[in-house]
Image (cartoon, rainbow, N blue to C red):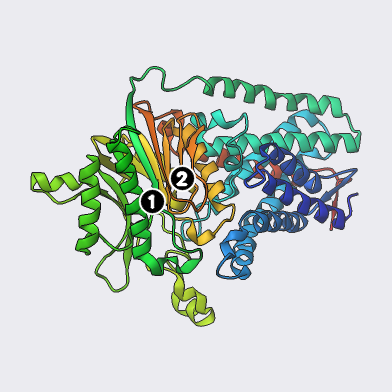
Amino acid sequence: MIPLLLRLVGAAASGALLAASFPPVGLWWMAPPAIAVLVVVLSPVRGTAPRARTGALVGFLAGLVFFLLLVPWVGLYVGAYAAWGLSVVEALYLAAFGAGAAVILRAGLTPGGHDGRRAAAALLGVAGWWSLWEWIRSSWPWGGFPWGRLAFGQADGPLLPLASLGGTPLMGFVVAAFGTALGFAVVLLLRRDRPVRTATGLLAVPLVTAGLVAAAAIDPGDEHPTQALDVAVIQGNVPRLGLDFNAQRRAVLDNHLRVTGELADRVDAGEVPRPDVVMWPENASDISPLADRRAADQISALSHRLGAPILVGTVLPTGEGREATNSYLVWDGRSADRGEGPVADRHDKKYIQPFGEWLPLRAPLEALFPIARTAGHFVPGDGDGVVTAAGVDIGVAICFEVAFDSAAREPVAHGAQLLTIPTNNATFGRSPMTYQQLAMSRVRAVEHHVPVLIAATSGVSAVIGSDGAVQQETEIFEPAALVAQVEIGSAGTVATRSGSIPQVVCCLIGLVGLAWAVIHSRRRPAHDHEES
């Protein structure tokens, strides 16, 4: 029998190990051991099995430690209570996982007949149950919070090619399955109960995974003609850190105008090739160039000088009170020569973040927490996330949108050959947030075999190849211009075409696994004891 205190210590260790698999630590191989430790402390050992309520407590503690270590930057400038509040809420999803996993593990690992079959069923059930709760917390409520999905910690790991087959759902399922198999091996060794017979079936996990990785490693772009596109990514930097950097909107715009002007000087001098398209970050011009003539003329002049459209992140009022959209404009200064307006295309951010860009329950929260008044009044846009610039269809996922599967998949499914992530990380200072976002972007590149460009106000900006490799990146809080040539024309993978099917399959495996475990537990022998 494992004492409750020991189970809780194991849960805390599991959360810490899982956090270590993500940046800034970035030890991708820590994720399976993290899941393994959680499985061990949720499993029956020597005739005793934890109840579902014990599983919920164990899962909650693991989740609390995990998120407190993963997202402390949430409260960097608003107070630690924000990080604690988010972590507590997210830990509730892991509590639900722990409750169900305890039931599944009790059915699969309690000694009895057909140990190997039941262990295999439990292994799939636990991995699917994890996938289900990752999906739920990534979707609900208020759009969900996908940060911390298992796949996002695997950008440097050997399982990354799986993203092209089944996206982040398949990657997360396989990582969870590996961890569960490892946990089963430890439990069997502790029990000394026919471990060889039961463990033999667990060998299927690495064998099947190796086959999937080999299949995914075949470059999906080999059969498609490609073309070269010269791009420039501008990082203008911000005048100061913190939430109030927006008070100096003109300074932020001037920074991006200056760095882009310096790029134009280098182009004129023949030092770098003339870009086909220039990417600015989110909030690069919060002085709306649609309303401010000076800003419009300055951006148009640079676009005309470079002979390329500039993609500009800005905030546009809707005309309904304080509401606004977080928008990305394709600004082409050459349009005036054709008698047209400068805005050739536009994307409005669809996945806006609760408590940051908009505030649920605004009235009571503002009354209780004065800091809540700093939350934005943004409204979501619509559309497929595709804009056209320089004759190329470009997918746009603004800042946090990169964490949502459909925000990256939908534009590529609608023809985008390049994915850009305009982002503003200045509100998170020098925290690991930007490096976690970089890891997500690398996963998205492989998931859809598409080059990814991150344009950040303060860093890290980056050019990522369709294989997930970072070709160029900037330092944080330093102005810079990245000039690169990327290959376009081969975007799209099995994961792109299959849409949400892998997610549905993984979730169904979890639901079926729990149903099987509940039915089996009702038939379990009388000597099967439960811990309180």
Q: Position of residue 436 (x, y in %)?
A: 56, 47
Residue 308 appears in the picture as rendered:
no
Q: Residue furthest left?
A: 339
Q: Residue furthest bottom?
A: 367
Quadrant of the rendered image containing residue 247:
bottom left
Asked whether disc 1 touches disc 2, contact meaning CB atoms under 8 Å apart, the reply is yes
Residue picked out by circle 1: 281
Q: Residue furthest top?
A: 223
The residue sitting at 84% across, 38% down in the picture is 187
Q: Quadrant of the C terminus?
A: bottom right
Q: Is residue 532 left or right of residue 427?
A: right
- For label 2, the SS is loop
Name which residue type carries label 2.
Ser
Q: Is residue 487 above or below residue 428?
A: above
Q: Is residue 292 above or below residue 339?
A: below
Residue 461 - label:
2
The residue sitting at 26% across, 50% down in the picture is 346
Viewer-nearest residue: 238 or 63: 238
Q: Is residue 218 left or right of residue 48?
A: left
Q: Position of residue 413 (x, y in %)?
A: 35, 35
Q: Is residue 325 above or below residue 11?
A: below
